[in-house]
Image (cartoon, rainbow, N blue to C red):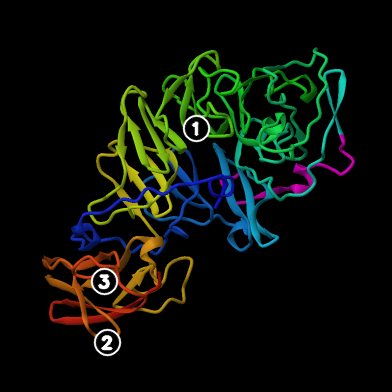
């Protein structure tokens, strides 16, 4: 995955115990079986413009209410290569996408930069500004700022420098790349330059001052001045102000959009210097609410004793801040007028009144399915009249501020084919994920078809055909494709040992048998 798994110091999982009817249930509303489906069910990030929605990591997109999900042509670095979408920014016909991949170093996965993809024709063709241009040359050991030459450590390898956030205005593009800090192109990706930020502890960086510091993103630990060189997020506000989030707080510039790099002014706000400012120093996302142009930031705990997680919002370019959802790890936010949607570790939070109060949706449910109880909600975006939430268990969307939902997953049709795989076998039913781990997956889903209106019964047996349990019996289902769920327990709610579990579906006098490999 992207930033959210790579950079976590720790992560805790909320255990939600589902009612029994949600742990072993036949759902009574048909489920779709799309041929033009999303590529995978774990969606890490999204971007929207107008009624078009793009999702990562595989760069599927959808336009308006068309249920089809498309794959961009000629985006070979992602479609057939190892590249994955880490960030995206959109304008009419223009797409700027940050690409990365997972490299393996010393037996560990490392988030690695591939470069910046750019399309000016709505995604029909792409050019790649690769790491030979976006990173430094080994000889780049100094950088000119104001009247001084500041010593720097050149960032010459793509590892630990993926483009976690990207934004652009006209020909100017910014991206935040963790070890590579904040980078800017003023010629629409043809060349790139490193942007100097103040070291942690310097509240204001001005070119006319006598600045004497060394820029080393490696630092000497997690409590040093170099944290502000580690770039998480960047955003260009509607008034041209540039906001850059780092591991050392929020940086605000009134001239970074147009000024020469050595003349850019910055203010730094962090939880250490101002407890009335940010909640936490890791500013992982920055978003502007079109309703009132307030700037919302997601704050994570860094290393300060003052740090908390939650949202910090400023309505006056960083002079003052409001705090929301203290104690919650929020990954991304989006807006719909006065409504605010926050996607996080413990669910989705929705405010209908610009943050004055919040509703907590711990688990999203639709009329025919639901998200697993341990689902993490990674991203949020508004496309057209629909707000989308991306998660580890598919996509959810709503047109009524979260009172009802639609859930989108890969969910192969029973004929085994979709636009990504043409060679799947045709079956009467299948279970997924399979193998199934109750600890990891929470639930296994059984997809089956009812060809004529009939009662449906699903029973489970072990390898010796001993009865395990029966799912809720459903009467008079109409013809269609349906889904049942099971959590890996027997009729008494006890966890089962590893092994093969057979399921038997009886509908309209027809019997269908399949198997699930249970591996804890």
Residue 410, quarter of the rendered image: bottom left
Tell me the crowding category of disc 2: few under 14, some 14 to 19, or many 20 or more residues within 10 angstroms, Cα based.
few
Q: Residue 169 falls in which quadrant of the image?
A: top right
* Residue 238 pos. (x, y %): 54, 22
- Residue 56 in the image, given as x and y percentages of width and height: 52, 51
User: Which residue was labeled with disc 1?
Assistant: 298
* In front of the other: 475 or 250: 250
| Residue extent of the magenta highlight | 121-141
Q: Residue drawn at (77%, 49%), measured in percent from left and top?
A: 157
Residue, far bottom: 464
Which residue is rendered at x = 44% and y = 47% of the image? 12
The answer to whether residue 326 is seen in the rendering is yes
Q: Which disc is residue 213 wearing?
A: none
Expressed as whole percent of the image width and height from the top left, the position of residue 88 reads 57, 42
Q: Is residue 423 magenta?
A: no
Point out the frontmost of discs 3 and 2.
2
Give the residue number, with chain letter if any, for mark 2: 464
Q: Which residue is mark 3?
A: 448
- Closest to the observer, 18 or 162: 18
Does residue 385 sit above or below 30 in this rendering? above
Q: For the C terminus, give its image quadrant.
A: bottom left
Q: Secondary structure at mark 3?
A: strand
Q: Earlier in the sequence, mark 1 or mark 3?
A: 1
Q: Mark 1 or mark 2, which has the lower sequence index?
A: 1
Cα–Cα gap, marks 3 and 2: 24 Å
Q: Is residue 337 above or below residue 49?
A: above
Viewer-side residue, 290 vs 433 = 433
Query: Residue at point 87% right, 36% down?
Result: 141
The reply to whether the magenta stretch includes residue 136 is yes
Please rate how many residues cluster around mark 3, counting C-alpha atoms within 10 Å: few if below 14, some from 14 to 19, many from 20.
many
């Amino acid at each position: 995955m992207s930033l959210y798994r790579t950079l976590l110091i720790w992560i805790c999982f909320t255990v939600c115990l589902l009612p029994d009817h949600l742990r072993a249930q036949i759902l009574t509303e048909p489920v779709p079986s799309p041929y033009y489906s999303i590529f995978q069910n774990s969606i890490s990030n999204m971007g929207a413009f107008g009624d078009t929605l793009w999702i990562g990591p595989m760069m599927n997109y959808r336009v308006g209410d068309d249920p089809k999900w498309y794959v961009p042509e000629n985006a070979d670095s992602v479609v057939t290569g190892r590249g994955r979408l880490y960030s995206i920014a959109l304008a009419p016909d223009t797409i700027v996408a940050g690409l990365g991949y997972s490299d393996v170093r010393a037996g560990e996965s490392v988030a690695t930069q591939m470069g910046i993809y750019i399309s000016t024709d709505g995604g029909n063709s792409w050019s790649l500004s690769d790491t030979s241009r976006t990173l430094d040359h080994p000889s780049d050991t100094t950088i000119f700022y104001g009247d001084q030459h500041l010593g720097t450590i050149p960032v010459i390898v793509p590892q630990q420098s993926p483009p976690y956030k990207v934004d652009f205005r006209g020909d100017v593009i910014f991206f935040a790349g963790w070890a590579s800090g904040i980078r800017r192109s003023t010629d629409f990706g043809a060349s790139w330059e490193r942007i100097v930020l103040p070291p942690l502890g310097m509240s204001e960086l001005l070119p006319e001052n006598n600045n004497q510091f060394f820029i080393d993103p490696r630092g000497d630990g997690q409590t040093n001045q170099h944290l502000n060189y580690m770039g998480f997020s960047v955003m260009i506000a509607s008034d041209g102000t540039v906001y850059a989030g780092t591991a050392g707080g929020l940086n605000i510039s009134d001239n970074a959009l147009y000024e020469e790099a050595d003349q850019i002014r910055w203010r730094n706000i962090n939880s250490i210097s101002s407890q009335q400012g940010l909640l936490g120093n890791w500013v992982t996302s920055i978003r502007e609410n079109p309703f009132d142009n307030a700037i919302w930031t997601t704050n994570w705990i860094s290393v300060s004793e003052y740090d908390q997680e939650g949202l910090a919002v400023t309505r006056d370019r960083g002079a003052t801040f409001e705090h929301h959802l203290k104690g919650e790890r929020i990954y991304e936010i989006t807006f719909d007028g006065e409504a605010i949607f926050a996607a996080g570790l413990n669910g989705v939070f929705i405010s209908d009144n610009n943050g004055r109060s919040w509703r907590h949706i711990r688990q999203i449910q639709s009329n025919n399915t639901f998200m697993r109880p341990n689902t993490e909600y990674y991203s949020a975006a508004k496309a057209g009249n629909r707000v989308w939430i991306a998660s580890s268990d598919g996509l959810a969307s709503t047109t009524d501020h979260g009172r009802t939902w639609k859930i989108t997953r890969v969910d192969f049709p029973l004929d085994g084919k979709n636009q990504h795989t043409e060679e799947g076998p045709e079956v009467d039913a299948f279970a997924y994920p399979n193998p199934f781990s109750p600890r990891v997956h929470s639930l296994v889903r059984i997809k089956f078809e009812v060809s004529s209106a009939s009662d449906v019964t699903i029973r489970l047996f072990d390898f010796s055909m001993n009865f395990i349990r029966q799912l809720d019996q459903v009467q008079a289902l109409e013809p269609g494709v349906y889904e049942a769920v099971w959590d890996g327990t027997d009729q008494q709610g006890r966890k089962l040992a590893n092994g093969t579990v057979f399921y038997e579906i009886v509908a309209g006098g027809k019997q269908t048998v399949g198997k699930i490999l249970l591996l804890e």
